[in-house]
Image (spheres, rainbow, N blue to C red):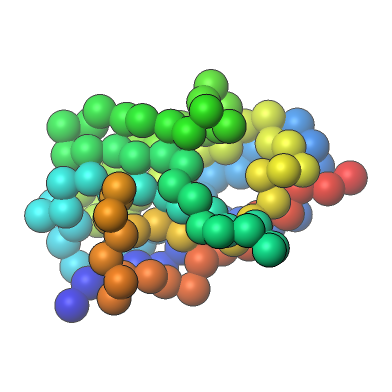
Amino acid sequence: QVQLVESGGGLVQPGGSLRLSCAASGSIFSINSMGWYRQAPGKERELVAVITNGISTNYADSVKGRFTISRDNARNMVYLRMNSLKPEDTAVYYCNAAPIPIAGLWGQGTQVTVSS
C-alpha cells in the first residue's frame, strides 16, 4: 500500500516562493495522474494542479502562471513549485491521484501560510 508524505510548507510573505514535496513510499508510476490539492479553513478541498505520466499538466485558474507541478517517477516524488504567493493561497496542501483522489492515499498535508 503506497503512502504519501507531504513536506515543504511554511510561513512566507506575499510574493514569496515555496517548493512542496510529496514522497511516496512505493511506486507511483502506475498512477497515471497525480495532483496537488489544497484546503483552506472553512472551504472544501480543491484540486490546483495535475500532472500525468506523459508529463502534461493542468492548473486551476487561480494558480495558473504561478505554480508548477512536476514528478520524478524514479524517485517516487511529486513537487509543486509556488511563486508569487498570495494570502489566498494559505491552506493545507496535499498530494493524491487526480482528478479522482484515492481515499486511502491522503497524507497529513503540509501547511502553507502566506502573510506579512
- The residue most toward the top is 65
Task: Locate residue 92 relative to residue 77 in the image: left or right.
Answer: right
- The residue most toward the left is 30
Residue 108 visible, this orientation: yes
Q: x and y percent of residue 110 in the render?
A: 56, 63
- The N terminus lies in quadrant: bottom left
The structure residue drawn at horizontal position 44% and vertical position 47%, both measured from the top left corner, is 47
The structure residue drawn at horizontal position 69% and vertical position 63%, both measured from the top left corner, is 41
Tell me if residue 79 comes above or below residue 43 in the rendering.
above
- The residue most toward the right is 116
Q: x and y percent of residue 78 in the render?
A: 35, 49
- The C terminus lies in quadrant: top right
Which image quadrant is residue 17 in? Answer: top right
The structure residue drawn at horizontal position 43% and vertical position 32%, both measured from the top left corner, is 59
Q: Total number of numbered labels?
A: 0
Task: Locate residue 44 relative to residue 13 in the image: left or right.
Answer: left
Tell me if residue 10 comes above or below residue 59 in the rendering.
below
Q: x and y percent of residue 105 in the render?
A: 31, 70
Task: Locate residue 30 relative to residue 10 in the image: left or right.
Answer: left
The structure residue drawn at horizontal position 29% and vertical position 50%, both measured from the top left corner, is 98
Task: Locate residue 49 relative to residue 81 in the image: left or right.
Answer: left
Which image quadrant is residue 62 in? Answer: top right
Q: x and y percent of residue 29 in the render?
A: 13, 52
Residue 93 visible, this orientation: no
